[in-house]
């Protein structure tokens, strides 16, 4: 028969065991939370690094789209002063078709543009071309992995230049609805505006798609290269990126000797 003293000792022992179990469970929770917190810190740090690397600047900014350092984004980040000036006054026929002719060191590129779909973009390019803005500028970035583009239009030639103003996004539904991965397909030959990744931040930088590329539908597609122009860009891409990288200045330097925009 169990005495009252034995019963008290048994209850005390059970209580002690329960306390030990609770302490052990508490330690496990703390360890698990510490691991989770550490993992989150790594993810946040990686995200911050990725964000900091994104950009192909259209001006002097803290983030540079010169890639948009990010090889998956043809971004161009306008400087803080980029939007200080207004975009050019509308002077084109918004119902007409236009052609932009780029005479480059890598070959001539003709780009068909439809002002009815992208009036602000066409108007801006005509205004800049008429002023000789693009003449003598370099196509500063070639990407040969992830996305397949040659990026041009920066007067500084390093991914940090722009025209001093920004233009609104246009024609963003032209390539269809984004898929489950959040992207649409930019066919080879497409010409589109680079931006910061934020709405309505295009400037003068644009990219030439030389191979089918998937990107978020936030880049204004405003033109299509002719066959000869596409071939010229593909030849530049075949030569690769300087230093053997996948994203950076093209090994075959490309200079826009002259740009002009005319009504068709």
Image (cartoon, rainbow, N blue to C red):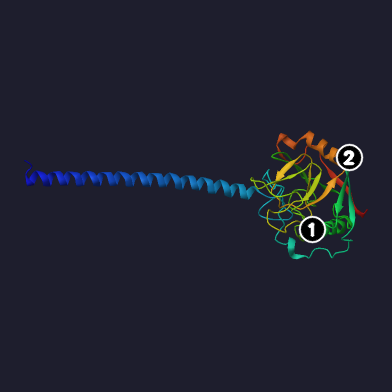
Question: Residue tagged by mark 2?
Answer: 228
Give the image location of residue 151, x and y in percent. Answer: 77, 46
Tell me whether circle 1 and circle 2 mark residues in contact (CB < 8 Å): no
At label 1, counting other C-alpha atoms closer than 10 Å, the crowd grade (few under 14, some 14-19, many 20 or more) is many
Give the image location of residue 164, x and y in percent. Answer: 77, 60
Q: Quarter holding the N terminus?
A: top left
Nearer to the camera, 200 or 244: 200
Compared across the picture, whether 128 is left or right of 40 comes to right
Give the image location of residue 216, x and y in percent. Answer: 69, 49
Instruction: Give the distance between the C-alpha atoms of the residues marked 1 and 2, in whole angstroms.
Output: 28 Å
Instruction: Compare marks 1 and 2 and give the one earlier in the sequence.
Output: 1
Give SS at disc 2: helix
At label 2, counting other C-alpha atoms closer than 10 Å, the crowd grade (few under 14, some 14-19, many 20 or more) is few
Nearer to the camera, 116 or 193: 116
| Disc marking residue 76 | none
Nearer to the camera, 203 or 12: 12
Give SS at disc 1: loop
| Disc marking residue 163 | 1
Compared across the picture, whether 68 is left or right of 86 comes to left
Q: Residue at x 76, y 42 (%)?
A: 149
Q: Is residue 89 depicted above or below 150 in this figure?
A: below
Q: How many numbered discs, if any?
A: 2
Q: Residue at x 84, y 47 (%)?
A: 224
Nearer to the camera, 147 or 45: 147
Q: Residue at x 19, y 44 (%)?
A: 14
Q: Is residue 241 depicted above or below 123 in this figure?
A: above
Q: Of the residues tagged 1 and 2, which is closer to the observer?
A: 2
Compared across the picture, whether 51 is left or right of 165 comes to left
Give the image location of residue 202, x and y in percent. Answer: 75, 56
């Amino acid at each position: 028969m169990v005495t009252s003293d034995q019963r008290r000792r048994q209850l005390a022992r059970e209580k002690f065991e329960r306390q030990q179990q609770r302490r052990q469970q508490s330690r496990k929770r703390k360890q698990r939370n510490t691991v989770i917190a550490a993992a989150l810190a790594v993810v946040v740090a990686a995200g911050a690094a990725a964000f900091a690397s994104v950009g192909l600047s259209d001006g002097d900014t803290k983030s540079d789209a010169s890639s948009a350092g990010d090889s998956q984004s043809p971004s161009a980040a306008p400087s803080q002063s980029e939007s200080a000036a207004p975009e050019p006054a509308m002077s084109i026929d918004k119902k007409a078709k236009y052609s932009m002719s780029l005479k480059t060191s890598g070959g001539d590129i003709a780009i068909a543009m439809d002002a009815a779909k992208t009036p602000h973009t066409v108007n801006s390019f005509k205004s800049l071309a008429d002023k000789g803005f693009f003449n003598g500028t370099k196509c500063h970035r070639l990407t040969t992995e992830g996305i397949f583009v040659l990026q041009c239009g920066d007067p500084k030639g390093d991914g940090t230049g722009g025209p001093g103003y920004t233009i609104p996004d246009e024609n963003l539904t032209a390539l269809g609805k984004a898929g489950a991965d959040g992207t649409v397909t930019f066919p080879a030959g497409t010409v589109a505006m680079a931006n910061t990744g934020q709405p309505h931040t295009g400037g003068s930088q644009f990219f030439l798609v030389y191979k089918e590329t998937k990107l978020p539908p936030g880049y204004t597609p405003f033109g299509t290269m002719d066959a000869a122009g596409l071939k010229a860009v593909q030849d530049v891409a075949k030569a690769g990126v300087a230093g053997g990288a996948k994203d950076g200045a093209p090994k075959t330097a490309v200079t826009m000797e002259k740009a002009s925009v005319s009504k068709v």
